[in-house]
Image (tube, grey):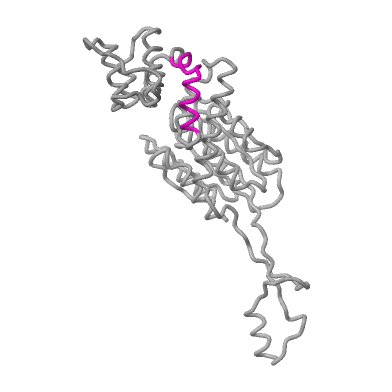
Amino acid sequence: MPQPGGARPPPQFGRLTPEKLVEAEIVAGTRSAEQYQDMTKGMKFPKIKKLTELAIDYDNIPALKGIAKSNQYAVAEALQSNEGVRMLERRAARGEGSAPELFFMLRSNYDPKYRKIYRRLARKSILKSSYRVVGRGLKGEIRVKTEYEPGMTDFDMDNLIEKYLLNRYIQYSDIVAIERRSREKIGVLMFDTSGSLYGSKFRNAAMAVAILAYHLAKERYAVILFNTKATVIKKLDEKVKIDELIDRVLESESAGYTNISEALKTGLLELNKDKRTEKFGVLITDGCFNRGDDPRPFAKSYFNLHVLSLPTDKAWGEKVCRDLSRLGKGRFMRVHSVNQIPRILMKLLRKKS
């Protein structure tokens, strides 16, 4: 089988030692990340690095992810090469998720030069895939009746016809103009980053932030990531370019416990910076809080609190999510897979437009 990039000939396997067997599986490219992890568990650094280089040559992302779970240091060192950058550059240009997923797994092991390169590729992938989800029709419009001024082209025709039928003539003062205005929206996104954000959960967290930023580009919004503590990634009254915002997410900390009450309290502090009442919150969590107070009393202070319930094997977690959306006068939306988060969030935001 010819090698895709042409950088090296296929390995000669000979007698199938454990290492040769993994090489054969990498070339075949038919295994999952979990299987590659199992096959490389306990291997020494030089062997892991060699297998990583082979996975790069064969553009085998599942192998890279699986091997990285066995030895992050060896995989990071192998990826600090022109071949590794070119491989992920191609995938990031298509908006695939491998660049952000690998960045988060390996970021602490890269030297500063390559950390910057791979963060840029992760951001590029996230923005491209997020914009694909957002598509057209980001902003809603409202039609406001107002006093007619010369040059206006939209009128309340029903009103004009009614006036004519009643009076058999139309006065200048009878003309009611229609003005189209962008619907004002003020919101806060609160994303649960407790536990491990390996793989697609982390990518979808970053995509959720990007989608909110695209959708509310000219509005006021805040972004909060929370685990044991809540961290404000973007303040409501702060202007941040979307590239910088995604970089903040990419460099954020994950893991820890689940403190939903602190997230809701922090979200309210941000929303209360604006006096208008048409404000909303989006909470993305599995509901299984194990730090802080019971979050349900805090939900009552929200004008609209919408909850995207992440997959969990604990039934009480989903019940908490349902309670939060009910008390917060918002919508409850169940997420069966973390890969559904971007599209479900976009669906929710469009309904609010």
Is residue 269 left or right of 90 when viewed as pictured? right
255 shown above or below 273:
above
Q: Is residue 87 magenta?
A: yes
Q: Is residue 194 magenta?
A: no
Is residue 352 left or right of 62 when viewed as pictured? right
Residue 194 visible at all: no
Residue 37 or 92: which is nearer the viewer? 92
Give the quadrant of residue 220: top right
Residue 135 drawn at (x, y percent): 52, 50
Residue 80 drawn at (x, y percent): 50, 16
Please tell me whether the stretch drawn in magenta is mainly helix, strand or loop: helix
217 shown above or below 111:
below
Residue 136 visible at all: yes
Residue 318 drawn at (x, y percent): 41, 41
Residue 311 drawn at (x, y percent): 39, 37
Magenta residue span: 75-92
Q: Residue at x 35, y 25 (%)?
A: 33
Residue 174 or 135: which is nearer the viewer? 135
Is residue 244 left or right of 317 when viewed as pictured? right
Give the quadrant of residue 175: bottom right
Residue 116 or 279: which is nearer the viewer? 116
Give the quadrant of residue 313: top left
